[in-house]
Image (spheres, rainbow, N blue to C red):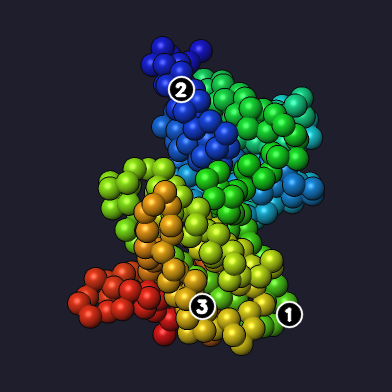
Amino acid sequence: MPTTEELLAIIDLQVEVAELGLDLSGVMDLVVRRVLDLAHAEGAAIELAEEAVMVYRAVAGRALTQLGLRVDVARSLSGLCIATGTSLVCEDSETDTRVDQAACRRVGLRSMIVVPLMHHGRCVGVLKALSSRPQAFTQEQLTLLSLLSRVVGTAMYWATRYGESDLFHRATHDALTGLANRALFMDRLRAALAARQRQGGAVVLVLLDMDGLKQINDRHGHAAGDAALMELGARLRQITRASDTVARLGGDEFAIVLPQARGEDDGASWSQRLAQALAPPLHLAGLSLPLSASWGCAVCPPEGGSIEALMALADQRMYAAKRARKSPGMDAAEGGLYI
């Protein structure tokens, strides 16, 4: 049985989950982070079943690079957990015929626990703990993960009580702005790069930080800050196509994926459109709040074919733009670097 300390930690987690309310993606992120300590795991993930694949929708620790990854249901222990609705333990991936050994080797995985996530009486996903060591988990840790899975299942119920179709929307979208969240952003970026390899063309990635959010919160309150974040998201949607993905990654961080980008979507042209979209202030309850941001663009090809390379380059350019914005004499609209 779990210790008193572990049970108290789960009670504390339930309080935090209640404070997050209907933010299902926030709940899932919180739970996988807690799994690392409670289960003494090196990595943790929540995978949701979407048609014939399992999609990594929340990750922590060793699994961080797997966010948005899609795994064949028929070839994974997670898929077997979904099919049977029972908790499963892999003591050693090198000898367990139920797992995809090649995939386990790629991520350095030797043992894992997977427990089902139940929603409206149906198994819709799994909570997973990972280790690079064989036989890393005990029966006690399996019990703990089962308790945590109930926390997620309860959050799923309350977040989607108005309709089962809300489940994946709540798991993949930001509760405040309605934009895609980090998990869906990574999923769409992976898909865009894979499609580019098959079909050619280009993919533009934009990373963006809203400037001045703390000052708005401090001077006018968090309601004004939330309104500014929602307005920024709305303006980003206005200058993108339906096929593009606009995401809020968290806090004041946003991102955009432009798959199959056309000539007018190169970094320079897109940056000009963004600067024009942010130029008008937000008028709110008699206030005139400036919307300011710093951003960086990366294009595939020729600037990198991997997610890691594009993210690193766009992030580097975004922070260069942020530093330049603070330099005397720079115009407030010149927020992006793209070369």
In what element is the residue under mark 1?
A: helix
Residue beneath disc 1: 199
Name the amino acid type tagged 3.
Arg
> Is residue 306 depicted above or below 97 in this figure?
below
Q: Position of residue 240 (x, y in %)?
A: 61, 70
Name the amino acid type tagged 1.
Gln
> How far separated are the C-alphas under marks 1 and 3?
27 Å
Residue beneath disc 3: 273
Identify the residue at image location x=72%, y=43%: 49
Name the amino acid type tagged 2.
Val
Residue beneath disc 2: 15
Q: Residues within 10 Å of mark 1 (few under 14, many from 20)?
A: few
Q: Are marks 1 and 2 in contact (CB under 8 Å)?
A: no
Closer-to-camera residue (193/23): 23
> Is residue 204 depicted above or below 115 in this figure?
below
Q: Where is residue 107 in the image (x, y as percent from the top left)?
A: 54, 53
In what element is the residue under mark 2?
A: helix
Between tags 1 and 3, which lies in front?
A: 3
> How far separated are the C-alphas under marks 1 and 2?
48 Å
| Quadrant (top left/top right/bottom left/bottom right) for the C terminus | bottom left
Q: Earlier in the sequence, mark 1 or mark 2?
A: 2
Q: Earlier in the sequence, mark 3 or mark 2?
A: 2
Q: Earlier in the sequence, mark 1 or mark 3?
A: 1
Between tags 1 and 2, which lies in front?
A: 2
Identify the residue at image location x=37%, y=43%: 222
Q: How crowded is mark 2: few (under 14 residues within 10 Å), some or many (20 or more)?
A: few
